[in-house]
Image: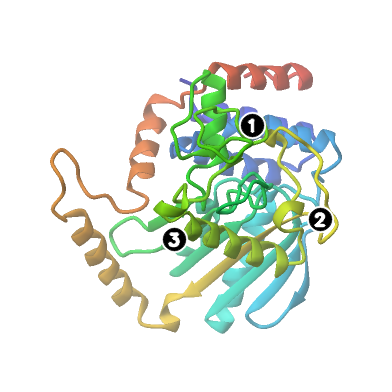
Amino acid sequence: MIDAKRLRTFTEQIFVAIGCSETDARLSADVLISADLRGVDSHGVARLPGYVRLYDHGRLNPQPRIRVIHETPSTAVVDGDRGLGLVVGPAAMQIAIEKARVAGTGWVAVRNSNHFGIAGYHALLATEHDMIGQAMTHAAPLVAPTFSLEKMLGTNPIAVAVPALTEPPFLADFASTAVAYGKLEILQRKGQPAPIGWAQDANGGPTTDSNAVKNGGALLPLGSDREHGSHKGYGLGAIVDIFSGVLSGANYGPWVPPFATAGFMQADEGVGIGTGHFFGAMRIDAFRPADEFKAHMDTWIQRFRSAKAVDGQRVLVPGDPERAMEAERLVTGIPVLEPVIKSLDELGERFGITL
């Protein structure tokens, strides 16, 4: 176990070491550590070496000039200048929030960015302003659409955050695939097999090989196969890709540039600029009085939690497991796998920073 504050300080120092401002380094570390605290270990400090590799390959600008290149009263397109998605994402969401203050809703498409961490972090920013937040991003092509042998889509997550009155916000944050690629990476580090339904092999058959994606296979859409609704996961991933890529002017589909942990660094870019995201903020009082709505959200949340459950289980509201994990890890620390510690130690040695 590593104390969250200690891990946060180390992460900040690494980002500063590659040229980020202290403000951007602090924000980036906050996004990553929030993932670890919430139990989303696949998107926390385990990703830190990947961002450094992006920098090493000239794909990451540590001091970007983030700018609006097109806008209307309720919409904007933002160019991230190859910056950390961990920084570009919150900046774009803030623009969506400001648009919503004026127009009731705000929608921001982003191009020329990089991996932005957990989608839920960005969506939650809107709830602090009595708004519903939405965040989505496409990613490197690791996913085969239903019946495809080619990798065409990323894990393409969607997050929606809704504020309540006395209850914590509702937060649904999920990949459009059967599992996020980071979960396979964890199994790879542990040398363990993957469950059936997570990936297919190079011939399109079911596999338990956690290295299948690296060996010519692909991740599967949410639903895993046609009989279990993979076409719906495929559809969700396609929607995210179109909003994040085609609408923003970023690359899309098989042309989305990879993150450094995908097993390859180069992509056949050319249909757009960099990686894209899409954000939305909806002012609650544009629909009904905010406190009235939030009181009803309390009722909604409490009623779902009290639903009769199967033996030995209880019904959870999206966001509950992550909040419980965060409360625990703030006390006990963050468990970090040995391979991840080794990679962080190597970064520390390179930059003269001690973990």
Instruction: Work out how far the residue at label 2 is from the one at label 1, CA to CA, in angstroms.
Output: 22 Å
Q: Which mark is residue 81?
A: 2
What residue is rendered at 52% in x and 81% in y?
104
- Amino acid type of disc 1? Thr
| Res. 159 in view | no
Residue shown at the point (76%, 41%) measured from the top left: 20
Q: CA distance from mark 3 to mark 1?
A: 26 Å
Residue drawn at (75%, 33%) of the image = 52
**In the rendered structure, which amino acid carries the disc numbered 3?**
Ala
Q: Residue at x 72, y 58 (%)?
A: 252
The residue singled out by tag 3 in the image is: 161
Using residue 143 as the reference point, say whether residue 2 is left or right of it: left
Front-lying residue, 161 or 186 = 186
Rounded to the nearest whole Å, what is the CA distance between mark 3 and mark 2?
27 Å
Rendering colour mode: rainbow
SS category of the residue bearing label 3: strand
Sequence order check, earlier mark of 3 and 1: 1
Work out whether residue 212 can be spotted: yes
When the figure is inspected, residue 311 is found, relative to residue 2, above or below; the finding is below
Query: What is the three-letter code of the residue carrying label 2?
Result: Asp
Decide: few, some or many residues near mark 1? Use Cα within 10 Å; few <14, some 14-19, many ≥20.
many
The picture places residue 148, in percent across and down from the top left corner, at 62, 51
**Which residue was labeled with disc 1?**
11
Under tag 2, what secondary structure? loop
Q: Are marks 3 and 1 in contact (CB under 8 Å)?
A: no
Number of residues whose C-alpha sits closer than 10 Å to that of mark 2, classed few (under 14), some (14–19) or many (20 or more): many
